[in-house]
Image (cartoon, rainbow, N blue to C red):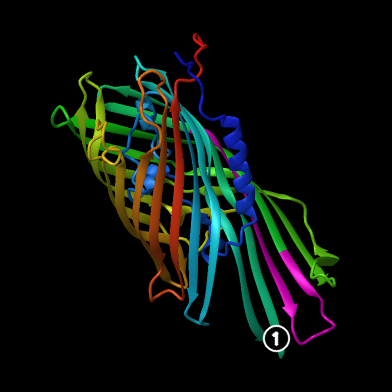
Amino acid sequence: MPSVTTIMNPKLSFIVFLILTFYTANAQENSPFSRYGLGDVYPSQNVINRAMGNISSTYANGQSVNLGNPAAYSELKIVTYDIGVALDTRSLKSANPVLKYNSVNLTPSYVALGMPLSKKHNLGLAFGLKPLSRVSYSIQDNKRIYGDSINYLYEGDGGLYQAFVGIGKRWGGLRIGINTGYMFGTKQNSTITTPVDSVSTYTSNSQTLTTFNKIFFNAGLQYDAMLSKTTTLRFGFSGNLKQKLNAQQQINRETITYDANGSMQKVDSIYQPQEKAGKIEFPLSYAAGISLNSSVIDHLGNKFEKSILAVEYETTKWADYRFFDQPDKLINSWQFKVGGQLTPNPLSIKSYWDRVNYRAGFYYGKEALNVEGNELPVYALTLGAGLPIRKWRSFDNQYTIINTAIEIGKRGNKNNNITESFFRLSFGLNLSDIWFIKRKYE
């Protein structure tokens, strides 16, 4: 009998995740929308959920980590390792002046490990790391002031990350879960002002670097109402309360010049006060949904999910966001989501395609931005599949699934001067095995 072994080293994949994070920090992404708040909000769901319109409040599966609702940890049946990456293609268009910018970015999505702590007591644990937002923009603006042409270059970089650990418990049809951990990140903004006509005036650089961090908490619950032996109506809710991040801010005002290679060189420091401490108010958010789940039962009494149809509403109170006690051009955001999954025959032995999980969804909503009095709508269509690449065998308990998600959507409409079309291709690797058990056979 073969020994039970792990199928991937978690440390290796964690290193890969950090490499991808570094790559993203140097990618040629340019989103003017990320200038506000803490940047563009990344989808924080598992690739499985992204393919279903980003629905996560009602999803629970014994072989994947639901990053959107910790109550689902209680359903973990086997040690599960999840890692995800996304390839973003964006096309920015400006109506006035008429401009277009395209970018392609490889983005780390998450790395997570989930495990059942006690199958008898329906207790599960999960922990991991994921990015929550990204600041990355470079915008030029030319103006004429007092007879001189001035070139302004606005640039920003940074983002918010979350390292989390959570636990979920089930009592009958009720599941409750809680996450805690550490949120951390940076936001750097700079404005480079260059006089075009005057050769005797230096270029100025105004730069502000803010670092922030705080322990966080969020929670979720799910409730199953059995309509029949194989049909369940599930209610889900997840969210977090308003939280204040500890922040430190460094301000630097200086004159600069450029050398022959185009590298920036400081001429003189004009203003550089001591580091300033403050708070960033992270807003309340929640998601609530309902799903209809159908399953099949094998000859041993084990349940296998056959279909899911779900709807969800999610909102974040960004109007309450404060950055060192100052508001931003933000309003409350919301999304309405519809999604589902179909597995033709989870118990099929002969047909591979009958065991594939086919997923689709749609979402529509409003982004948090309110620039120049115009709201920013967002909508997208999602598709995906869960592709098993290893046949289930009772003696080794190893499962390997590649999850895919395609997201095609748009931010903005004719009322917005800048609109963004996006195409996001996400890949998730789901590895399940019996780990942490002493080897008995060779």
Is 67 covered by the magenta stretch? no
Kindly tell me whether residue 198 is visible in this rendering.
Answer: yes
Q: Residue furthest top?
A: 440
Nearer to the camera, 289 or 49: 49
Amino acid identity at mark 1: Ser
Position of 53 with respect to 141 (left or right) is left
Spot occupied by residue 151 in the image (x, y as percentages of width and height): 69, 79
Spot occupied by residue 94 in the image (x, y as percentages of width and height): 49, 76
| Residues drawn in magenta | 180-206
Magenta part, dominant SS = strand
Is 197 covered by the magenta stretch? yes
Q: Residue furthest bottom?
A: 147
Viewport quadrant of the N terminus? top left
Q: Residue furthest front?
A: 350
Q: Determine which residue is flagged by label 1.
A: 149
Q: Quick check: 139 above or below 379?
A: below
Which image quadrant for residue 124? Answer: top left
Position of 265 with respect to 41 (left or right) is right
Q: Quick check: 49 above or below 250?
A: above
Spot occupied by residue 395 in the image (x, y as percentages of width and height): 38, 18
Which image quadrant for residue 116? Answer: top left
Taking the spot 34% from the left edge, 32% from the top edge, the residue there is 61
Indicate the secondary structure of the residue bearing disc 1: strand
Alpha-carbon neighbours of circle 1 within 10 Å: few (<14), some, or many (≥20)?
some
Q: Quick check: 413 above or below 349?
A: below
Taking the spot 38% from the left edge, 76% from the top edge, the residue there is 414
Taking the spot 14% from the left edge, 32% from the top edge, the residue there is 227
